[in-house]
Image (tube, grey):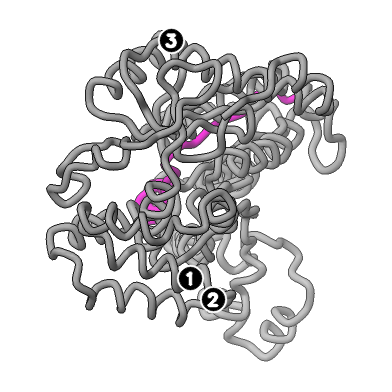
Amino acid sequence: MGLPSVSEVQSVQPRDAAAAAVRALSVAAAVDAALTDRVLVIGSLPPFGRDLDLLVRLPQRRQVVEWCVASGFVPSQDRWATFDADGPYVIDVEHAERDRWGGRDPSVLFADAEPLTCFRHLARPSPAAVLVLAGRSVVARRGRLSAGTRARVDRVLDRDPDAWTTAEEVARQLGLRGALRALRAAHRSRVDSPPARAGRVLRYLLGPDPVRVKAALVRESLPRRLRPTVVSLSGLDGSGKSTQVRRLREALTQLGVPSTDQWAGFATSRKLYGICSLLDRRAWTPAGRRELRAQPLDPFVPPGCRTGTMAPHLWVGLAAAFNALQLWWLTLRPRSRTQVLLFDRFSPDTAVKLDYFFGHERRLDVRFERALFRLLAPRPAVGFLLAVPGEVSHARRQEHWGPRELECMAQLYEGHVPRFGLRRLDGRRPADDLHRRILRDVWRAL
């Protein structure tokens, strides 16, 4: 199959797309030069797409991995990515090993592969192999036929209308006849609802394929995490958190990682007045109850809880627990197909607000409440502090706080870096540099 040259790509594509396509061709050529035997390109052919999906045998896997390490690619399980000015680019390395294929030898997939023009070792799989791989993908995705896989199947059938027949023999050798039938049913039907997907998986499980092959494929279909990977960005107003969250979500989308962003603010004690008014002695008199229903003078601590030995600790402890539960709710509530949950503010920001509002401004001893919050609150899998001085934050966002208040909060943030395992970044660095550093660290954690 002929591939476009660099000059052809640059002449027919926009500048940014052409740069990405040239980068894809150069990466494919470098990988091809590092190989000593044939590997299959099972996804989009270079220079199309932002990834290079390869099916490799064990010796070629070592060669690809060695090239990725030498070229500065960042690993995430079997995926290797680079992040540069042209955007992220991924090499996905799938093993053609017996244990991942239920003890069957997947070498049959390499038969009749078509070498790609200008490459010595990169090859396109035969139409039959494409269909078998697509069938395996449908089961691994729990009955879902993605738009990209459907388009790939359509192109194969245009090339070879008899591909279903030849694919049956390949599927028989691999014990994947049931998976091929699941693909055919999904391709014929335009219905992709949850009941339809569940029906395809059930028919596969009850089908004739060997138990060992089914077990290997079912293991592959299980989600690696029961809840999304939590990534948080913390810091003062104006430190660039929202910008980095937006850019990180866009980059993860390009990498094929479903993500959702979430803002998590601090819940003031005013929200707790109606629930826990018994802690406030004003609630014990009719006049006090009328005052509670009015706008509180102090939105954080009722006057009746600012004196005494136990009342302040009870109130601040209640605020700490309430905020921790609110963060857990934002973390655990159902989200469809979200793999990464990006928080603009998270537990470290709430801890700083507890210290500032109750400890610094109202001179309360909050050591116990600080420890209680750290015990109850969720922690990020990857957390970042975008650190900026108070005067920088004030210059960027002159809204609610003065330079002195912001500098106090900046010092409080520094104290919480080791407590929450945050990665401290200088928020004054260029946004592009920060983005690449954050993206690399998040990618490693997936």
Mark number, residue 409: none
> Which residue is identified by label 2?
189
Query: Which segment is the magenta one?
Result: 368-390
> Which residue is identified by label 1?
186
Whole-percent x and y of residue 271? 64, 71
Asked if the residues shown at circle 2 and circle 1 are in contact, with their CB atoms under 8 angstroms apart, the answer is yes
Q: Residue at x 66, y 68 (%)?
A: 270
Binning the other alpha carbons within 10 Å of mark 2 as few (below 14), some (14 to 19) or many (20 upward) gives few
Mark number, residue 33: 3
Whole-percent x and y of residue 314? 45, 64
Which three-letter amino acid code belongs to the residue tagged 2? Ser
Can see residue 349?
Answer: yes
Q: Give the Cα distance between marks 3 and 2.
A: 42 Å
Whole-percent x and y of residue 394? 81, 29
Q: Quadrant of the N terminus?
A: top right
The kind of secondary structure element at disc 3 is helix
Q: Earlier in the sequence, mark 1 or mark 3?
A: 3
Can see residue 258?
Answer: no
Q: Give the Cα distance between marks 1 and 3.
A: 38 Å
Q: Residue at x 13, y 59 (%)?
A: 212
Q: Quadrant of the C terminus?
A: top left
